[in-house]
Structure formats: C-alpha cells, structure tokens
Image: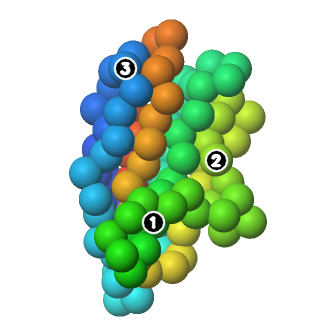
C-alpha cells in the first residue's frame, strides 16, 4: 500500500484558497490534515456546484477543520477546494490518498 501526499495549501499565515482538486469514485477516499491551527482558526472544505460556484460542504459530510478537529476523511467525488483563514502560525493543508 502506498500513500500519496499532496500539499493543497502551502504553510503560510495569510488566508488562502487551494487550487481546485477533482476526485472521482475510482480515486477512493482521501484524508485532509491541517495541523497547528489555533483557537478560532479554520479550514473549510468547499465543493463546486453545477453553476461553477463554491459552496461549503455541509459539516455532517466534512467538518470544518480547527484546533480540535485537525483532519477529515472524504469519500465522495467532486471538485473541491480548501479555504484557510489567516493564522498566527504558518499552517498548511495536506491531502493524503491511499
């Protein structure tokens, strides 16, 4: 088994949106990790709708990442991006696939 890691937001203090990432059913589930988030700092997973607009993924499907929830597992296909708030320390977002 091999694990592929993809940095979707480079470590930084500024607010940032990742580039879009397309995932298909055949890609299987993936894990997103944003370690080092402080209180009130978040990373939100967004999905592109049929009109090309970005919508936050409902928290029941993908919780907002924060200091108490630093990772999520996503098993659905779609075109996703990650929106990171400004952070006190340099924080990046990494996507892991198996």
Q: Which mark is residue 24?
A: none
Compute the Cα span from label 1 to label 2.
13 Å
Compute the Cα span from label 3 to label 2.
18 Å
Q: Quadrant of the C terminus?
A: bottom left
Vertical relation: 33 (above or below) 74? above
The x, y position of residue 91, in whole percent, is 43, 25
Q: Earlier in the sequence, mark 1 or mark 2?
A: 1
Tag 1, which secondary structure? strand
Crowding at label 2, few (<14), some or many (≥20) Cα neighbours within 10 Å? many
Q: Which mark is residue 47?
A: 1
Vertical relation: 9 (above or below) 27? above
Q: Earlier in the sequence, mark 1 or mark 3?
A: 3
Q: Quadrant of the N terminus?
A: bottom left
Compute the Cα span from label 1 to label 3.
21 Å
Residue indicated by mark 2: 64
Crowding at label 1, few (<14), some or many (≥20) Cα neighbours within 10 Å? many
Q: Which mark is residue 14?
A: 3
**Which one is in front, 19 or 3?**
19
Q: Quadrant of residue 9?
A: top left
């Amino acid at each position: 088994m091999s694990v592929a890691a993809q940095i979707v937001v480079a470590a930084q203090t500024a607010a940032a949106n990742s580039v879009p990432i397309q995932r298909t059913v055949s890609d299987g589930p993936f894990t997103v990790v944003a370690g080092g988030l402080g209180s009130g700092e978040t990373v939100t997973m967004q999905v592109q709708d049929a009109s090309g607009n970005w919508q936050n993924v409902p928290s029941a499907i993908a919780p907002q990442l924060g200091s108490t929830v630093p990772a999520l597992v996503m098993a659905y296909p779609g075109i996703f991006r990650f929106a990171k708030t400004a952070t006190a320390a340099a924080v990046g977002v990494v996507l892991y696939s198996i």
